[in-house]
Amino acid sequence: MNNPKRYLITSALPYANGPKHIGHLAGAYLPADIYVRYLRAQKRDVVYVCGSDEHGAAITIQAMKENTTPKEIVDKYHAMLKSNMADLGISFDIYHRTTAPIHTETAQEFFTALNDKGELEQKETEQYFDEEAQTFLADRYIVGTCPVCGNENAYGDQCEKCGTSLSPEQLINPHSTLSGKPPVKKKTTHWFLPLNKHEEFLRKWILQEHKQDWKPNVVGQCKGWIEAGLQPRAVTRDLNWGVPVPIRGAEGKVLYVWFDAPIGYISATRQWALDHKKDWKPYWYDNDTKLVHFIGKDNIVFHCIIFPVMLQLHGNILPDNVPSNEFMNLEGDKMSTSRGWSIEMNEYIEDFVKPENGGGQMVDALRYYLTSIAPENKDSEFIWKGFQDAVNSELVAIFGNFINRSFVLMHKLCKGKVPAFYNEIIDDKDKEMVKRIADAKLKIEDCIEHYRFREALFEVIDLARAGNKYMQEKEPWIVARQATKEGIPTPEAQAQIDNCMHICLQLCANLAIFINPFLPNTAKKMCYMMKVVEKMLDWENAGTMKLLSIGYSLREPQLLFRKIEDTEVSAQIEKLKQKTTQIKSMTENIESLEKSPLKPEIIFDDFAKIDLKVGTITAAEKVEKADKLLKLEVDMGFEKRTIVSGIAMHFAPADIIGKQVTVVANLAPRKMRGIESNGMILMAEDANGKLIFINPDEAVSNGSVVS
């Protein structure tokens, strides 16, 4: 679409079920932010919307893991995601959430409109049901072996190891995540979107109209889906967390999250319009709006096939483009939060973005590296050593070096002011540099307009590299030293110096404009050094040689970037290893606990023989020549007892004096290391093998019976 009246840009709504890693940032948020900042610099009407996806089984599963409610989960992680994105410079016009009332209203209106037009089909189907939990199972509540790659922990909707979209029926040996038991099929009624009726529309729209301007990976995946034959897809689910289906008789059913979530773009736009007293409808109904979805490749089917069908049926505009990135790996393996093999956004912020660690310049350092290795056409890989090299060898040694040298020499050779420019002595090197600046603007524009952000960033750095080369060839410091009269450069020499420094300073100003979409903190600091308002960063100013006025004094240079030290890289790699080791150990312990066989069954009369009483530890000491044993004196209320307990590896004697414990009071005495032990203290072992006292929540009298 050429010269649209307005732009609506979206990034995939992240699930509010946990922190997100830098692979997510590189896939759907950073490229969108670069594009949006460029459009704003172009003074175009653009709205950038996103928000937390707060419905679906992933949320309820996380709530069970954290022993809390779905509402508390989404409140916790929505706040985290919103804060992390802002800290890393992602400039949404609104970051909304799908639990907001306006979203419920928007999603229900959308469903009702399609249903009233007869575009949805209602039919009875068989769905997996957990007989023990007495509930229908959403796809995410079913786990089994992936038929494609053999991953034993594939979900009923997708295998997260190989990325294949699945249905529960395709899983081998499926079982419920609630009870661990194989589910059964049970009849239920749901509403379906008949995608099979819209194959011809999709074939023409994607495979003909957008075959050339969409990425090959997007078109290729869509072609595979269409040619395999599309099937009706359920838009409702039997769940108690989500947007209620607004139809009588559909109690207990909610909108399926894949149907509900993309409507979040519309509800976010509505909320933004309310906040800014704007009309939201042109952004979703006017064909003079350019809609662009930024996503990762695992979201292609939803944004290129399913949501467009929904939009067309509802009378909305269709996306002009869906720039989808591939995956970003980490140090030779796929990023995975669950395995600990990831760099979470909040972890990077904690380690690098604090003011004492670099603040904004370290935000830009991450943005730079992620863009330079962006998985635009194939999977890429984040390597900590690569991050260090990119910052030190490119940002510091090329871009930062040119800016710093220009300002230092300007203060040294031109009295701290922008020098004059003499057209009558301009040479070929000067002309070449001026042309290089003008050409760079056109190249960067073309790259960004066509979503080639890696290439655009390379052009910016290459322009700074050309500036260093130009300065080195002109050698104004040599001219100043050699062509002097009584220690002062001759007028002819000063004119040569002035021309060189004038071009270098104008190039600095242009670099600030060009780098702004990518590294906004850097551009802001450069504006401060040049003593110009940020209005100078408007794109219309780029490519010219009149950005800084002759005679205008500039500030002393500030270092734009700091170097990344070897110790920092080593610490991050070690942290990564420790994190994966800890998670693996926890997982193995949990699995071991889950698989621990029960002891032989007993009857109530057996249990009734056990006399459990509360006592207080009044003294404790280590047993000589026994690493694991402590000798305890326990006040039982009616008497004091000596008990030998194997807890010395877990507790220091001084720390447990005064602790109330549960004692098996009628256990036969037993000698241990020559000490008679009269009882046993009850303990529990957590997933990490740590012992925990089983004691009353509140203090009770010693000798109290536990029943």
Image (cartoon, rainbow, N blue to C red):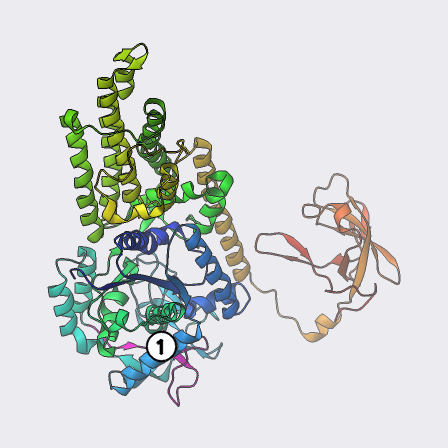
The residue that appears at 42% across and 70% down in the rendered structure is 57
Image vertical order of residue 570 relative to residue 285, above or below: above
- 416 and 616: which is toward the camera: 416
Asked whether 174 or 78 is in front, the reply is 78
Q: Magenta stretch?
A: 230-256
**Is disc 1 placed on a helix, strand or loop?**
helix
Could you tell me the amino acid type at mark 1? Ala
Report the residue at 17% width, 56% height from top.
Answer: 216
Q: Is residue 462 left or right of residue 2?
A: right
**Residue 678 in view of the camera:** no
Q: Is residue 352 visible?
A: yes
Left or right, 132 with respect to 636, comes to left
Residue 34's spot in the image, x, y percent?
30, 51
Q: Main secondary structure of the magenta part?
A: loop
Q: Residues within 10 Å of mark 1 (few under 14, many from 20)?
A: many
User: Mark 1 = which residue?
Assistant: 107
Which quarter of the image is occupied by the C terminus?
bottom right
Q: From the viewer's perspective, tell me whether residue 214 is left or right of residue 275.
A: left
As displayed, is residue 467 above or below residue 328?
above
Position in image of residue 452 (x %, y %): 22, 49
Question: Does the magenta-highlighted stretch encompass residue 107?
Answer: no
